[in-house]
Amino acid sequence: MPHPPATPPLDLNLLPGTPPVLLAEPTGDAASWAAGYRDTLRTLAVEHGAVLVRGLGLHDADQAGAVFRHLATGLLTEREAFAPRREYADGVYSSAKWPPYQPMCMHHELSYTLDAPGLLLFACLTAPGSGGATAVADASAVLDALPAELTGRFEREGWLLTRSYNDEVGASLAEAFGTDDRRAVERYCRGHAIDFAWQPDGGLRTRQRRGAVLRHPVTGHRCWFNQIAFLNAWTMDPEVREYLTDLYGADALPFDTRYGGGDPIGEDVVQLLNTVYEAHTAREPWQPGDLMVVDNVRTAHSREPYEGPREVLVAMSDAVRLTARVPGAEAIAS
């Protein structure tokens, strides 16, 4: 089947409070359509931060994976996952397993790694009965809206992620690193600027310091790029936080964040970050068959609570490597 002309479609809906929505005419071959409009979609994602494509009729993992591969520059294998996923094919994953009644607050996917994805691809196979939107927020606007004193401190110090791996909460050691072999895990940590310590019970605790602000590798715009709020204990449901603190102790939570110098981040700061994110959030409820292309540096994303079955697949591409993930580092496309 011939590819459609790769010209910007005329029916791109730009409405306040929603991501741009592109209405595609079904061709019966979503992969060929994606191949033809690859450059257009990627350009729109850089320009607007995200674009939702409606009308392709994506209905299974094979079809979604074919579309993902046409749009990506090679699909990435996830490492350092914070929650488990199902892998449908190489580089094609389910959404992170997270209780449907709990929100996944705004974050940039894998922004604590040294090779973060620059592009995220989502495909909705089953839309929930209510809720469950993958909302987005402009990271440059968020940075501008935050107090300069706060962002200045994070730029000077960076932020610190601490993790304690176990088999009960979040991704297990094997799910996060792709292996449970201690030597392989240690090699990975040494190669990715992660401090680690094995515990008497066989568990692993890690610490990694990263920068909080990143320049976009294409536009050069400064973006608030991190998971400071999402992975902080104060973002948890209070009952969940209390339970995990009683179970593991305040210094051994499955994950938590601090200022880069090690000082704890107050509840007021976490609430401020989430409030600013919400003020800059755009959302559009999923419909079955939807595709969404997200610039992971320009745009934070979340997953809102939902009811009913929900199946959204995700792929990651276009790795963005930093010379060093510390304050002042510059991003480069690898």
Image: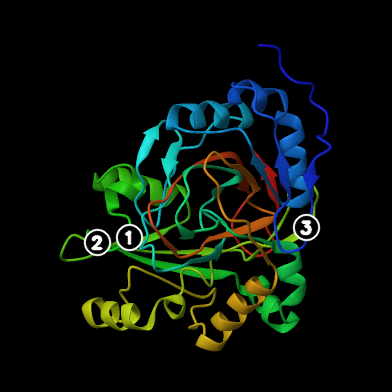
Q: Quadrant of the N terminus?
A: top right
- From the image, state whether disc 3 or disc 2 is nearer to you: 3
Give the quarter of the image for residue 187.
Answer: top left
Give the quarter of the image for residue 92.
Answer: top left
- In the rendered image, which residue does mark 2 sit on? 166
User: Marks 1 and 3, Cα distance to the nearest angstrom?
Assistant: 36 Å
Residue type at numbered disc 1: Gly
Residue type at numbered disc 3: Leu
- In the rendered image, which residue does mark 3 sit on? 15
Q: Position of residue 41 (x, y in %)?
A: 72, 37
Residue for point 78% across, 57% down: 15
Residue type at numbered disc 2: Asn
Q: Secondary structure at mark 3?
A: loop
In the image, residue 160 above or below residue 334: below
Q: Say which label, 1 or 3, has the lower sequence index.
A: 3
- In the rendered image, which residue does mark 1 sit on? 170
